[in-house]
Amino acid sequence: MTVCCQRTADLGTVAEIVKKYAGQPGALLPALKEVQRAAGHLTTELLDQVAKGLNLPLSQVYGVASFYTLFSITPKGKYIIRVCESAPCHMVGARSVLKQLERELGIAAGETTPDGLFTLETTSCLGICAVAPAIMVNDQVHGNLSPDSVPEIVRAYREKGGDE
Amino acid sequence: MMQFYRSHILVCSGSNCSLRGSRAVREALVREVAAAGLAGEVKVVETGCFGLCEQGPTMIVYPEGVLYCKVTEADVSEIVRTHLLKGRRVERLLYQEPTVPKAIQLAPEVDYFKKQQRIVLKNCGTIDPESIDEYIANNGYEALGRAVTGMSPDQVIEEIKGSKLRGRGGAGFPTGLKWSSGRKAPGETKYIICNADEGEPGTSKDRLILEGDPHAVLEGMAIAGYAVGACQGFVYIRGEYVLAIERLQKAIDAAREYGLLGSGIFGSEFSFDIEIRTGAGAYVCGEETALIESMEGNRGEPRIKPPYPTDSGLWGCPTVVNNVETLANVPPIILNGAAWFAAIGSSNSPGTKVFTLSGDIVNKGLIEVPMGITLREIVYEIGGGIPGGRTFKMAQTGGTSGGCLPGTVLDVPLDADSLIPHGSGLGSGALLVMDDTHCVVDMAIAFARFFAHESCGKCTPCREGTPRFLEILQKIAAGQGRQEDLALLEELARVMLKAPLCPLGQTVPVPIMTTIRHFRAEYDAHINQKTCPTGVCQIGAPAVAD
């Protein structure tokens, strides 16, 4: 899972994670997941450290980090809102939910609010089509949405603010 | 001493019910049961998905089999006081049959369950998925024991071949044949991979199987390992499937503790262990060679085939990749025999199929039906029909990579091959029902957008072709289309059906072109009359609304 809060990467912790995976076949994905969990997002500096530690070319590490949607090479908001736009959600108004979220947050899909609280993304099927249209805010699912239910959800997370 | 309970309450703890608050309901039940002094008489069990996701949170009270739907925390004390203490049903929470005006009390009476045949889902909703003992009490691990102590690997493969089991992940390849290729391939080290990277839009069957009966999949993998000659298995599962991952890990730990995974299983020479690998968000990793690339720590880009994974898969070793549902079919086949399985459903693809129902249908959720059932039976009998008295327009079978079928196909018996003449297939078993309020052009845009997002970028036809589909369709939706655009789509489809490297690119034209094939008049209306018959598309809006 992507981790969202901005944390200062403790390079010592990262070194330990990388060391644990060094020499193991297929270790890159689990290593990147753990580093991201500790650091918030994968900076070039961190990717370089992972590459050196696992004895892989930086190009491969960057290629992997930029390929998968759960990895992030740019800073993300504390709350990542993922809007499912697959067919079952699309047909019951996912687009209007997305538009309302864009209006409410003042950003377009793919962007992060200036206060660093929210990142808005679209996603492929979350597999919870019985409650379509659905979104995920970090690990929390919200389903059966309409544009009208958006402000309340955003307000609740705004109120929670920095402390979770 | 074994404790006897006069009543068991099974509370669904699948993702959909959890989302609707089933955990709070279960906790309240435990509290209220204890407060009423019934703790020694009534047992509350957390179980897997019943399938009636639209009605959640659901629970069944045994021995009567009373099904309660949409239960909230506030309803719990009434259930305890009225049902458990006084023995009367709580009428207002009973399941309401969509087609019959009276409330139905008992789970087995409900049309939804009557038409189903549960092989893969037999334990889902009836046992506690976190208890290996309950799985074992339901003949769990008996098939593995029988295979490793009483059958040769070749006999196991012959049994699977004889059952005519075909892969349930989408391609429908004969499972026995795949195992036999894996067995024959030279090499000391071989692997079994369970493909749980379920990403097909509208499909959640693999997640709900893993959440509801994880041991069935582990047992199937171990039998596959014995047959193929592998001693290591991996479950590659979507990173988003948090609950399934947790349950699977618990199941693996319990099986190891019982000696059902590890070395010398059932006192035989056979050793097998299983590890979980989680995905990082890429639809294409459901394709087996992309999945293997991802497990090796690379970008999940498909490989050129051949060589097939059964010859050269994970780290160059022979590897058998099977879908979750396929593997869950294996233990019952070994237990009941190939002939039993081959007699169920349709003759060229026997057995059952698990479908995920979504869209404009009353009962959304998970069902398991014999192959050969018709779309009409699924939609109108099990699914309860279209809500709000609307009319059926089309159904998309097999997820976004499947075709859209009109009402004329409602009576075709469904199996692995029967939909091919109509431009679709069963795929992973997603079934998206759409009523007459939806526009085919708008839906086609949703399909194209999905593929444009998920194309991995490795091969040119898919990387460049999918955005072209999207652009042309968006132009048509905005009223800027020309008749030539349909010819252009046809040409693009011809290239895309053949040229891409993997099935992802090759299926892009399928959903889009079936909407043109079956609903041509609606495209013509957008192009010639500049109107959207359903009023969904915004004619005159900028073509690229993204």
Image (cartoon, helix red, strand yellow):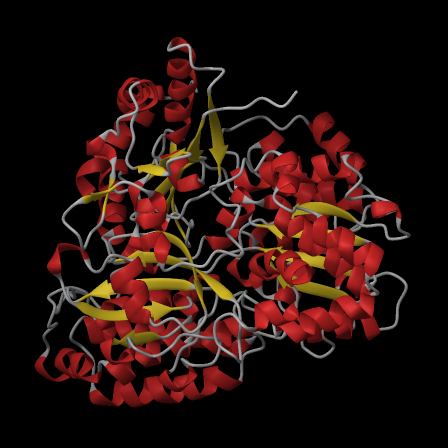
> Looking at the image, which residue is at 59% across and 66% down?
B287
Nearest the camera: B195 or A119?
A: B195
Q: Is residue A41 visible?
A: yes
**Looking at the figure, which quarter contains the N terminus of chain B?**
top right
Nearest the camera: A109 or B225?
A: B225
**Looking at the figure, which quarter contains the C terminus of chain B?**
bottom left
Q: Quadrant of residue B541?
A: bottom left
State left or right for residue B118 relative to residue B144. left
* Position above or below: B391 against A59: below
Q: Please provide percent x and percent y for residue B284.
A: 54, 63
Q: Please provide percent x and percent y for residue B417.
A: 47, 80
* Position above or below: A91 against B372: above
Nearest the camera: B486 or B325?
A: B325
Q: Is residue B303 visible?
A: no
> Looking at the image, which residue is at 78% across and 64% down?
B227
Q: Please provide percent x and percent y for residue B120.
A: 54, 55
Nearest the camera: B143 or A101?
A: B143
State left or right for residue B429 relative to residue B351. left
* Position above or below: B69 against A28: above
Total labels drawn: 0
State left or right for residue B278 relative to residue B212. right
Q: Please provide percent x and percent y for residue B130.
A: 59, 34
* Position above or below: B476 against A84: below
State left or right for residue A41 relative to residue B75. right
